[in-house]
Amino acid sequence: MSLAFCCTDTIFVRVYESRMDLLRAVIVGAEGTPYHDGLFFFDIFFPAGYPSVPPLVHYHAGGLRLNPNLYACGKVCLSLLNTWSGSQNEKWIPGVSTMLQVLVSIQALILNEKPYFNEPGFAHSSGTPSGEKSSQSYNETTLILSLKTMVYTMKKPPKHFEALVLGHFRKHAQDILAACKAYMEGVQVGCLAGGGVQDVDAGSKSCSTLFKSNLAKYITVLVQTFSLIGAKDCEKFLSLAKKGSPNLPSNFY
């Protein structure tokens, strides 16, 4: 039997009564990021040395790499987990660091508004025209991968989170599709927050033509999947798919 509890309004976890060394967590992607309204799952194992040593964390990647810190194999690179370099204060500190701190760090530091700059080699270009342009392009790719993550999560929800997954996407299907519509109409990925469009730092405020074409093509998959789980009135967004390109790779879905 597993027990569920909420760490924050956007982080939920389940523990197993018979295996207190195991934990499964889901983080909701924040608005104002290319991860908005997505669900991102992590399995956590507490080794014998915990809490003197950090937990081991595995990301449910589904073979997709939508962040420099989250590998397609499930590896999570984070100084707090001692899986990435960092100052002594950024690493796991026995008696100080906590599991909640790990989850909040993943949410705030990894699943952020400009994940392109999480890559150490690119961090120095933040704020420059070329850096911001590359960041925008990365966000566009990330948004598509986040949508793909939503689809495979709905089709095969992680065990003991089935109700949460289906309930979440039934509730947010309209918001997700409306955001896709806004992106296709010119809003830059990562600019939607608080029910409106927030400012961007540099570069064009419109998404690329290729991204709009790719997104339009994926609308049909989203609408079909949302409808299968019982989300209402999604079919009205199918008109967006007519703007898609017919020349996408056969493995796009």
Image (cartoon, grey):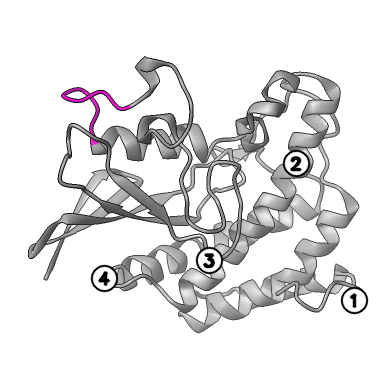
Residue closer to the observer: 216 or 124: 124
Helix, strand or loop for disc 3: loop
Residue under label 1, please give it.
246
Task: Measure the alpha-carbon separation of dots 2 and 4.
Answer: 35 Å
Q: Which badge, 2 or 4, is on the more N-terminal residue?
A: 4
Query: First in sequence: mark 1 or mark 3?
Result: 3
Q: Residue 190 at x, y = what percent?
A: 65, 40
Circle 2/circle 3 CB separation < 8 Å? no
State the SS at label 1: loop
Q: Position of residue 140 (x, y in %)?
A: 74, 48
Q: Is residue 243 left or right of residue 224?
A: right
**CA separation in Å, label 1 and label 2:** 23 Å
Residue nearer the viewer, 115 or 183? 115
- In the rendered picture of this protein, how many numbered marks are placed on residues? 4
* Kind of residue at disc 2: Gln
Q: Which residues are magenta?
A: 92-98
Earlier-in-chain disc, 1 versus 2: 2
The span from disc 1 to disc 4 (Cα, nearest Å) is: 39 Å
- Which residue is tagged 2? 188
Q: CA distance from mark 4 to mark 3?
A: 18 Å
- Residue 197: x and y, percent? 66, 36
Q: Amino acid at mark 1?
A: Pro
Q: Residue at left 48%, top 47%?
A: 29
